[in-house]
Image (cartoon, rainbow, N blue to C red):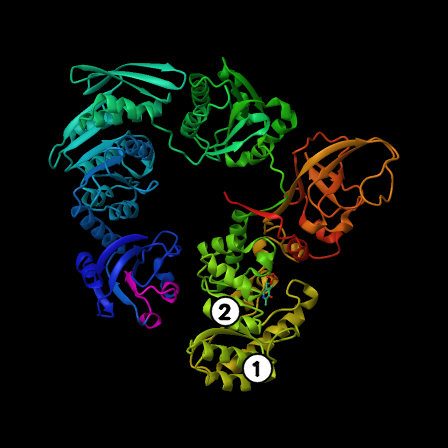
Amino acid sequence: MIPIDYTTAEICQITQGRIVQLEAEIQLRNLQIDSRKYDFNSHTLFIAIVGEHNNGHEFIPGLYARGVRAFMVSEDVPLSTIPEAAVIRVDDSVLALQALAELQRQSSDARIVAITGSSGKTVFKEWLYQLLYKRLHVLRSPKSYNSQIGVSLSLLLLEKSHDMALIEAGISQPNEMAALEKMIRPEIGIFTNIGPAHRENFASMEAKVAEKLTLFDRAKTLIYCRDHTLIHTGVAERNWVKKPKILTWSLSQKADLQIISQEQIENQTKLKARYHGETKTIDIPFASAASIENCCGLWLLLLFMEIEDSEIAERFAELIPVAMRMEQLEGINDCVLINGGYNSDINALSSALDYLIFQIKNLKYTVIFSDIVQSNIRDEKLYAKMAELLRTRRIDRFIGIGTRLKDHSALFYGLDATFYESTDAFLAAIGRDDFKDENILVQGARSFGFNRIIDFLQKKTHETVLEVDLTKMIENLNVIRSKLNPDTQIMAMIKAFGYGNGSYDIARVLEYNRVDYLAVAYADEGIALREDGIRLPILVMNPEVPSYSAMIQYRLEPQIFSFRTLELFSEALRSSGEVVAYPAHIKINTGMNRLGFDPKEMEQLGAKLSTSRELKIQSVFSHLVGSDEAKFDAFTKEQISIFTQSADVLARAFDYKIMRHILNSGGILRHSDAQMDMVRLGLALYGLTAHTANQAILKPVGSLKTTIVQIREINPGEGVGYSPKSRVKQRTKIGVISVGYADGLPRSLGNGLGHVWVSNRIVPFIGNICMDMAMVDITGVDCAEGDSVEIFGAHLSIYNLAEQLNTIPYEVITTISRRVKRVFVQD
Ligand SMILES: *Cc1c(COP(=O)(O)O)cnc(C)c1O
């Protein structure tokens, strides 16, 4: 949320907008452009922006419901749906945002430093911040906010107390820089370097340089590296509006800051330079060319700012690498494991190596890297460069995975290097003892599935966890969306603790991914979500009478299924004082014979509701009995038809539209023509379906995992666990795993009926399953105490397990006990 302090009238003046609804002035205290955020209030101005993937205007009614009362729009919006909101119309909401940003910058005294270039902008900005924050109050653009919108938001964060602002500016198209220049009007400009990014959108590299230089048309000072000839020529040939003072640095030629030597000792580099006739030195805690390039530009800027040499030296020595989404993990055998993620190109390797050699726990440095899959450099040259990077950083051991690396293994001379064709080949060839006391970087292209290598090398914690893959959940949501019309709403069912997966984290992700409604089984579940900050409307399917007043307090919407509950809830509303238009939903019984009004009660219900001041009916719905089975298709059609007729009768009693919905997961996948206004998505969201035909398109989100706590060998004739049913016939290796029936592992899986996955093998349970533990037969399996065990997940399908247990996956997943920790993973 970005603080502002304007009235609606002032906003109109600044942005050349006009009020199209509600003349009365509203005081605005903050501004928001992202409807997925939570922090809206009655002083928020929401600026609707038409983006490439989203149109902010679509979210206005939802934000209105959440209390937003001021909107800036550039398209027609149905004003009647937001009667009490101030609406400001502008031609272009991005330009309006920029006008606000420009004014903010004008009213600040901060020195503005603008940074552009093809790469290194974010690192330059972060390091400049690290170098200056002790002496100045510095604002820096958040993350990599450098677009037309990102720069606006950065400038809007300027406060009176800031001495300096570091603003990144990026362009991808011709003619974009002028707008950024107008907003930023930098005093000092930094041009980091020029490379081929977005080259395809420009007539030539020269044209791209010229476009970027527009940023500095009115700057007082411009700093760049003299060795980038394209930049140097561009600067010399430019028709400046007002020529800035030019300051250059160089590694090889005459410049304001001329580096005369660089000496590398371990990961440190000592830089010696001539600056205005004097010789100066600094030590920087990095060795990569990219880091040195950044440090030279920074050094020149600090000298220009007349900061003392001693202070410069001190600050440079303290620089720390900018985390480029590296994850640092505890590895097996005292290794430090750096998960570099899926970022695999030569620059990513270079910065990841910086990060790796920053680790000092162990003396040995190992890199596991995959083929580079997207590059326009020839393989010969690419892998020669990779080998050179590894040699200069003195990497002790390199493991290359992929056929192209393997084909170019000769380039990796001078290194302790091994190559494998694939991730599988690597995992098959190595053992746990092959890695000890090392700092290991693991990074590669997504297709190589290096998460399995991380899994192998990571030290295991002694816990039974249900791992919930939120990325897969979003993919499932999108698969479902693809089956629906764009304006069909989605109600996500997170009853039963998110079908056993854990509700809050799931609700948060669903809210972020714009589902329209949530539904829970009991009021308590809804209250917990509200207390955790979930703002979506929430339907409670089984609202129990004692919870009515709490529901009203937390604005949870009841399912009304009988005249009795209608009376009682209305009474609760009257006594709570919240008497008008409280949202509620009507459930009709069309054949399930569980909760619901019967179709013949519709006239009477309509008459009653139409005179109710307390309730506003949001939706009417029914539930299908056998939507995922062909044998029920005729019955499903009948249910849909009964529902439609009943809803028609009911609708006659109202002068407003009521939403209708009947489809659950199976219904969406098999009867999508009955999607009506909304669908209720349950099991499919978690990647499960009762119908095998759809299993391929959905991805199960949950895996149940535990660890081996002890391994022992027993002799023929011995038994395992309580009341052993049988004795072993040969010498047998037993693994004790820390999961039992109290965790939701059915006891009936014992004695060889169920299986787990360990160390690439499927092995049976042996003996009875105990309350907190179980034993598995790991004879002949190469595994160790502490190893991970999967009960279901990627290797063992939950469907098979459900089948073995003679039940459905719903039951398997919902019976996993609450004591099993839910761990959420997301790419
Ligand atoms: C559980 C439930 C759903 C969701 O069903 P799935 O088959 O899990 O998609 C929908 N509507 C109602 C009323 C439910 O109780």
Tell me where residue 351 appears, x and y as whole percent.
40, 28
- Taking the magenta stretch, the answer to whether it contains residue 79 is yes
Residue that badge 2 annotates? 551
In this rendering, position of residue 690 left or right of residue 527:
right
Name the residue at 29% across, 61% down.
43
Residue 484 drawn above or below residue 206: below
Q: Earlier in the sequence, mark 1 or mark 2?
A: 2
On residue 563, the disc is: 1
Tell me where residue 276 appears, x and y as whole percent.
16, 18
Residue 491 visible (yes or no):
no
Name the residue at 63% across, 74% down.
638
Mark 1 residue type:
Phe
Ligand 1 lies in quarter = bottom right
* Helix, strand or loop at mark 2: helix
Residue 215 visible (yes or no):
yes
Residue 439 drawn above or below residue 153: above
Residue 610 drawn above or below residue 224: below
Is the shortest distance between ligand 1 and the CB of mark 1 under 8 Å? no
In this rendering, position of residue 602 left or right of residue 377:
right
- Residue 546 quadrant: bottom right
Find the magenta span and give its range: 62-82
Name the residue at 50% across, 19% down.
363
Mark 2 residue type:
Met
Q: Which of 122/29 is in front?
A: 29
